[in-house]
Image (cartoon, grey):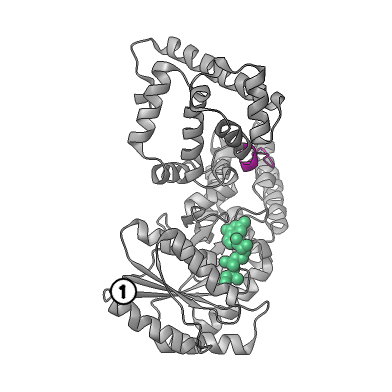
Amino acid sequence: LNEKLTAVFKGMRKQIRISEENIQDALKQVRIALLEADVNFKVVKRFIENVREKALGEAVLKSLTPDQVFIKIVHDELVNVLGGDDAAAKINLNSKPPTIIMMAGLQGAGKTTTSGKLARFFMKSGKSVLLVAADVYRPAAIDQLEILGRQIKADVYTDRSTKDVVKIASDALAYAKKTAKDLMIIDTAGRLHIDETLMDELVRTKDAVNPDEILFVADAMTGQDAVTVAKTFNDKLNATGIILTKMDGDARGGAALSIKEVTGKPLKFIAIGEKLEDFEQFYPDRMASRILGMGDIVSLVERAQDAIDPDEADDLASKIQKKGMDFEDMLKQFKMIKRMGSLESIMRLIPGLSAAGPMNVDDRQIKRIEAIIQSMTPHERKNAKILNSSRKKRIARGSGSSVNEINKLCTQLEQMNKMMKRMKQKLGSGKDLSKMN
Ligand code: GDP
Ligand code: MG
């Protein structure tokens, strides 16, 4: 979607002046871009009407920068459709803990993974969370939640002796109270399609524990289908919010635009990758910018703050500045970046890059480089100069790479050091680069 829209706006920037005709043309292209992104046609119709009305007003035609005014109108209308004001929709925390959150959605939508992500989200702010395994039909589902629980060090409630989901949820609630949990997240079963038995079970579970939040988890990749299913779940369960998963896929935006409009329920979170870190609160304005290909610097900075220990980063930066970078430093940097999530999901947040088309950043490439560095001795990591051909051969064997790859890596390190030296000279030797950020 954003590639298409970016193309529309590029075309507009070239025009000196926007007239009534080329606004019509731009509107038509925005309309096509939205429809191709699988946005519900009723939503598109209303969207275009609203933009047209505002765009044909005096502001655009008289403005000196009509293209920018037009983009702003489209952006604001996107924000509007995505949920209105700038703030992220919050989870309703119960004043009497535990706050109960029930996850619902089709099989494979991402309920279990997202339960783990949501738990991690709350645990970061010091809350205690109980994960409840209420998908009793696939034994693997319970295991999956237990593994997630271990990863984030959250308590997981399981009961393999019964298939009575209502009992599990009620027992889990008693356990959550006994252990004074702040939140309890119920991971429920899904089906490949909506069926009565499943809906009935979800409704009974709901009635038994009276959740504060019922979050419908929808796979953004399924586009229009996600919207239809959301409507059905919402009608039966009266969900309180929506989580869109797999927003890292190709179909970005389309489902997000329709789902709020069709269900009338707020989007609360988005998942943008398989890793536990690939999860964010949903902000309409940020999503609008992302859809328009303007990137999302705010989310990027937040992720960096979340993942990088400032002292650690400072130490590393001043060390590199004083003594140059070695392979050991490179390894440390990779570790910091990796804590922010998958490379691809990070790149998507960078303005311009997201509009540059499909990206070929590759987490595997980083893994290869890490393997190479890990095959070096500590001494070699700190002194790239001593890497002669016999050492390189040994490292290549140890890491399953080639001497050629190692040579390339050495060149890269050299170039980075050269670049940093130049930057330092430009800034004057007195400045401490590590304090620049
Ligand atoms: P459930 O059946 O609804 O519980 O779905 P799961 O949590 O088991 O997830 C199904 C699959 O989707 C798993 O392979 C997950 O790793 C994957 N998945 C979940 N969320 C995301 C996401 O945001 N992005 C991507 N790319 N994959 C995801
Ligand atoms: Mg599951």
Viewer-closest of 7 and 141: 141
Q: Main secondary structure of the magenta part?
A: loop
Query: Which image quadrant for residue 180?
Result: bottom left
Residue that appears at 68% across and 24% down:
393
Q: Is residue 245 visible?
A: no
User: Residue at 54% across / 79% down in the picture?
Assistant: 135
Magenta-drawn stretch contains 7:
no
Asked whether, in this view, residue 310 is left or right of residue 219, the answer is: left
Q: Secondary structure at mark 1?
A: loop
x and y, in percent, of residue 29 in the image: 71, 49
Describe residue 80's horizontal placement relative to residue 13 as left or right: left
Q: Quadrant of ligand 2?
A: bottom right
Q: Is residue 238 above or below residue 420?
A: below
- Where residue 47 sits: x, y (%)? 60, 59
The x, y position of residue 78, in whole percent, is 55, 55
Quarter the C terminus occupies: top left
For residue 294, which quarter of the picture?
top right
Residue type at mark 1 is Asn
Reply above or below: 171 against 420.
below
Q: Residue at x 30, y 59 (%)?
A: 126
Q: Classify residue 53 by image quadrant.
A: bottom right
What residue sits 42% from the left and 44% below the top?
307
Residues in magenta?
353-365
Q: Is residue 262 above or below residue 244?
A: below
Residue 400 position (above or below residue 403): below
Residue annotated with mark 1: 94
Residue 363 covered by magenta stretch: yes
**Ligand 1 closer than 8 Å to label 1 CB:** no
